[in-house]
Image (tube, rainbow, N blue to C red):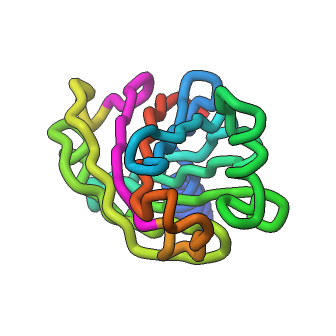
Amino acid sequence: MRHLLWAIALLLSAASASAADLRIDPTRSRAEFAVRLLWVSTVSGSFEGIRGDLSIDREARTAVVRAVLDTESIRMESARLRRWVLAPEFFDSVHYPQILFTSDPLPLELISRGGEIKGKLTMRGVTRDETFHLQATRCPADALAGCVLQLQGMIDRTDFEMRGRRGALSDRVNLGMAIVLDHP
């Protein structure tokens, strides 16, 4: 009986270690993009639909960030530009309703001190290795609830099969996220 209780306790601890430790608060988090148009102005928008989680491996002292952006949730100043970025030549929200970023395991200390976060970005059905810069926070690695993680990166849109309007639109797209961590 004692061995059975020990086995159950071990299974429960393993199950809780694989579950998300913190979630991305969708009401207080945001994600944005910006791309240069005709090298004079900038087209930008923000995603209202952002969710995900941060899973912590306490033994290895690492974490994995997983963020999902709903492309249809994009907000822009112009309804015409919004229709265009949702169309097939840009985000193609009908066929690809989500953008997903999953970080490689990162040391917990990196969250406090900031630095480069590598991971997989999936957009328009294409998954690529990308690197984002995480700004330093004042949050201790063992108390991340309530922390705001700010990530900034630049991607090449042609890597994700966004090849329309190359004469007028820059290939470089800035992506940024400010995600607030909370308990699940």
Frontmost residue, 141 versus 110: 110
Quadrant of the image containing the C terminus = top right
Rendered position, 145 above or below 12:
above
Query: Against 156, is 35 above or below?
Result: above
Is 37 or 44 nearer to us in this picture?
A: 37
Residue 155 relative to residue 102: left or right? left
Q: How far from the left and from the top, in percent, is residue 3? A: 55, 68
Secondary structure mostly taken by the magenta-highlighted segment of the chain: strand
Q: Residue 54's x, y, as percent?
A: 47, 47
Q: Reply above or below: 91 against 82.
A: below
- Tell me, yes or no, whether the highlighted magenta stretch contains residue 154: yes
Q: Is residue 62 left or right of residue 120?
A: left
- Asked whether, in this view, residue 95 is left or right of residue 57, the answer is right
Q: Is residue 84 magenta?
A: no
Give me the residue at 65% from left, 61% from top: 90
| Image position, residue 147 (x, y; %) | 38, 26
**Residue 39: % across, % down:** 38, 49
Q: Quadrant of the N terminus?
A: bottom right
Magenta stretch, residue numbers: 143-156
Q: Nearer the viewer, residue 41 or 84?
A: 41
Q: Is residue 59 visible?
A: no
* Residue 46 in which image quadrant: top right
Q: Is residue 111 left or right of residue 71?
A: left
The residue sitting at 69% across, 41% down in the picture is 81
Residue 163 or residue 47, whichever sits in front: 163
